[in-house]
Image (cartoon, rainbow, N blue to C red):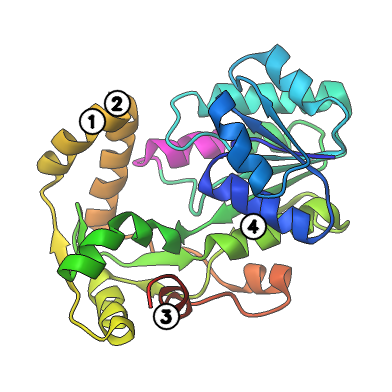
Amino acid sequence: MILVTGAAGVTGRAVIRALASRGAAARGLVSQERSREAVLAAGAAEAVVGDLRDPASVRAALRGAAAAHHICPNMSEAEIAIGANVIAAAQAGGVARLVYHSVIAPQIEAMPHHWDKLRVEAQLIESGLAYTILQPAVYMQNLCFQRREIVAHGEYPQPFSADARLALVDVDDVAEAAARVLTEPGWEHGTFELASGDALNRHEMCAILTEVLGRPVRPVTLALADWRRATESRLGKPATDRLAAMFAYYDRHGLAAGNPRALTALLGRSPARFRDFVRRQLA
């Protein structure tokens, strides 16, 4: 049995699907009862409700698991404490392999969620566990949050410069790589960047969207303050602050980090490119 934390999210469900395609039994850990059905529908053998902040809850979820893939809730202020809970529970439970879902370029202090993941990586390296760290680039799937604006209005809005260049990756490739390191020997004590080889700005993304959709799509840059007002009531102030710090960093520097060679080796093929993703998702 392989435990997947954060199982109800985009990454968690993708990892469960990838494990199921390999015939591996997955147990999904979710925070709410209402999420269990979606996790089971993704192919999990089991779905359990628990709190990653509660050490006893994490130990119970790991009971009988041979391996675990830890995905912390996105933008969580408790990332470091949750990571410590998962590592301690894996040590106590004799878990043979722990895979951690980190982020590309975690050493960037200006983005607090990156910096926190670096701290968890350090805990993991010091833990004595057989670990693997995966560092995915920006998900191509983030485009889907603006699907309505893109398809209906021909606009791709974001609260940072359209000139900012971002390294991209398809979450399905990330999940396939995760399933491989969870089920095959030889990937222990490795840290792997997961990037497609595409590092595009929004002008370039919109040119591809225009080509594939057959109608114009243009980038729109939202004022960060306006975005914050619209977002904080939905996500809360802590998560909004972390996202705002990320967008401010993108505005200044972009995030064109990451090399595709590690992901190519993990997949045994070339990763999906942004044009492939758009064709599959929007065309």
Res 175 label: 4
Q: Mark 1 touching mark 4, by CB under 8 A?
A: no
Q: Quadrant of residue 270?
A: bottom right
Amino acid type shown at disc 3: Arg
Q: Is residue 33 above or below residue 133?
A: above
CA separation in Å, label 1 and label 4: 30 Å
Please report whichever mark, 1 or 3, sits nearer to the chain's N-terminal start: 1
Q: Is residue 54 shown left or right of residue 230?
A: right
The stretch of residues the image draws in magenta is: 109-120
Residue in the image at 52% along x and 72% along y: 196
Please report whichever mark, 4 or 3, sits nearer to the chain's N-terminal start: 4
Q: Mark 1 touching mark 2, by CB under 8 A?
A: yes
Residue 208 x, y percent position in the rendering: 32, 81
Q: Is residue 8 shown left or right of residue 160?
A: right
Amino acid type shown at disc 1: Glu
Q: Is residue 219 shown left or right of residue 273?
A: left
| Residue that carries the numbered disc 1 in the rendered image | 232
Please report whichever mark, 4 or 2, sits nearer to the chain's N-terminal start: 4
Res 275 label: 3
| Residue that carries the numbered disc 2 in the rendered image | 236
CA separation in Å, label 1 and label 3: 32 Å
Amino acid type shown at disc 4: Ala
For the C terminus, give its image quadrant.
Answer: bottom left
Q: Quadrant of residue 141?
A: bottom left
